[in-house]
Amino acid sequence: MKLKSFIFIAAAALALLPLRASAQTTADMKSFDPTFAHVVYFWLHNPDSQADRQAFVASLSNFLSRSAYAKTKFIGTPPVATRDVVDGSFTYSLILTFESAAAQAAYQKEQPHLDFVAESEHLWKKVMVYDSTGLPSSN
């Protein structure tokens, strides 16, 4: 995927985050200005297996409900692609935002994240991660 295409897709996905955020109020979202985005794509070994999909989503949802660092949380699946620039080859996507790069680094070591990886890594054959830091606000 070309870099410009990825940036556009990531920006579009991040724009949707407040609409799909879990366990956050509108007031929380207005006061939170993320500076670090963590975008993860998962390809499952058996994407047609409903048991594998259910196990993965249950483990991922449990982890996200316990994470002390991830602020905005979005779990997605590929849409039906209508353009050539859309990569729909993944099984699940995860888009998280953090208040800082330090918070994201702490998230990598927190027990809920470690538990999720230990529980679910046998389900995926490939993981791709795209991290980015926000540009200074122009407000």
Image (spheres, grey):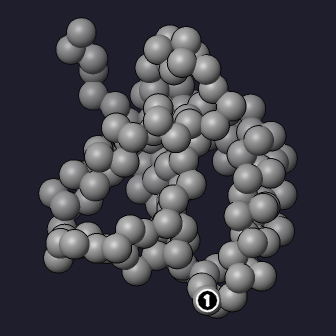
Quarter holding the N terminus?
A: bottom left
Residue density around tag 1, few if under 14, some if 14–19, many if 20 or more, within 10 Å: few
* The image quarter in which residue 59 lies: bottom right
The residue that mark 1 highlights is 48
State the residue at coordinates (24%, 52%): 7
Say left or right for 78 vs 138. Answer: right
State the residue at coordinates (32%, 51%): 10
Tally of marks: 1
Q: Would residue 124 be seen by someone viewing this image from the given angle?
A: yes
Say left or right for 88 vs 76. Answer: left
State the residue at coordinates (54%, 47%): 74
State the residue at coordinates (46%, 53%): 39
Q: Would residue 104 be seen by someone viewing this image from the given angle?
A: no
Q: Could you say where residue 133 lies in the image, as x and y percent from the top left?
A: 37, 36
* The image quarter in which residue 17 lies: top left
Is 108 above or below relative to 31?
Answer: below
Q: Could you say where residue 128 lies in the image, as x and y percent from the top left?
A: 47, 68
Say left or right for 135 vs 31. Answer: left
In this view, the residue in front, 129 or 94, is 94
Q: Could you say where residue 107 lies in the image, as x and y percent from the top left?
A: 68, 41
Is 65 above or below relative to 81?
Answer: above
Q: Could you say where residue 81 lies in the image, as x and y percent from the top left?
A: 28, 73
In this view, the residue in front, 82 or 55, is 82
* Three-letter code for the amino acid on which mark 1 is drawn: Asp
Q: Secondary structure at mark 1?
A: loop
Quarter holding the C terminus?
A: top left
In this view, the residue in front, 26 or 65, is 26
